[in-house]
Image (cartoon, rainbow, N blue to C red):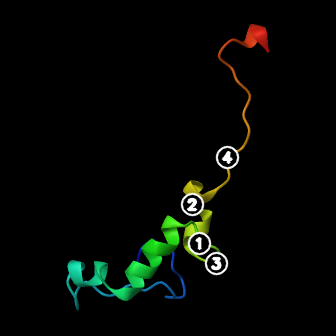
Amino acid sequence: MPRSFDHDGRFDMGVLKKKSFIDAWHSEKFQDLRAANLVKKVTGTPCEQCIAYRDAEPRAVYLNPAEN
């Protein structure tokens, strides 16, 4: 499983007691998941809550507060 909160097993990528890490990593499920992450197509997955996929929020510049 790619993340630790897959409560319904939807993202089960294999059991390492039954297959090698390399076989799991190169499985079709993991390849599809990595491809989706590369294009940020993560809606409906645990990954959509990751900060890596949130839009950047505008922030004030605090380098020299006297100039703001």
Res. 56 mark: 4
Q: Residue at x 74, y 38 (%)?
A: 58
Above-or-below relation of 11 to 62? below
Please state if 45 lies on the left or on the right of 16 as rendered. right
Q: Earlier in the sequence, mark 1 or mark 4?
A: 1
Q: Earlier in the sequence, mark 4 or mark 3?
A: 3
Q: Amino acid at mark 4?
A: Ala
Label 4 residue SS: loop
Disc 2 designates what residue?
A: 50
Disc 3 designates what residue?
A: 44
Label 2 residue SS: loop
CB of mark 2 within 8 Å of CB of mark 1?
yes
Q: Earlier in the sequence, mark 2 or mark 1?
A: 1
The local crowd at label 1, few if under 14, some if 14 to 19, many if 20 or more residues have their Cα within 10 Å, is some
Task: Pick the quarter of the image with the C terminus.
Answer: top right
Q: Residue at x 64, y 74 (%)?
A: 43
Q: CA distance from mark 2 to mark 1?
A: 10 Å
Q: CA distance from mark 2 to mark 4?
A: 13 Å
Which residue reaches farthest top?
Answer: 66
Q: Residue at x 53, y 82 (%)?
A: 7
Above-or-below relation of 6 to 18? above
The local crowd at label 4, few if under 14, some if 14 to 19, many if 20 or more residues have their Cα within 10 Å, is few
Q: Amino acid at mark 3?
A: Gly
Disc 1 designates what residue?
A: 42
CB of mark 2 within 8 Å of CB of mark 4?
no
Above-or-below relation of 4 to 26? above
Q: Position of residue 53 (x, y in %)?
A: 60, 59
Q: Amino acid at mark 1?
A: Val
Q: CA distance from mark 3 to mark 2?
A: 12 Å
Q: Amino acid at mark 2?
A: Cys
Residue 14 seen from this side: yes
CB of mark 1 within 8 Å of CB of mark 3?
yes
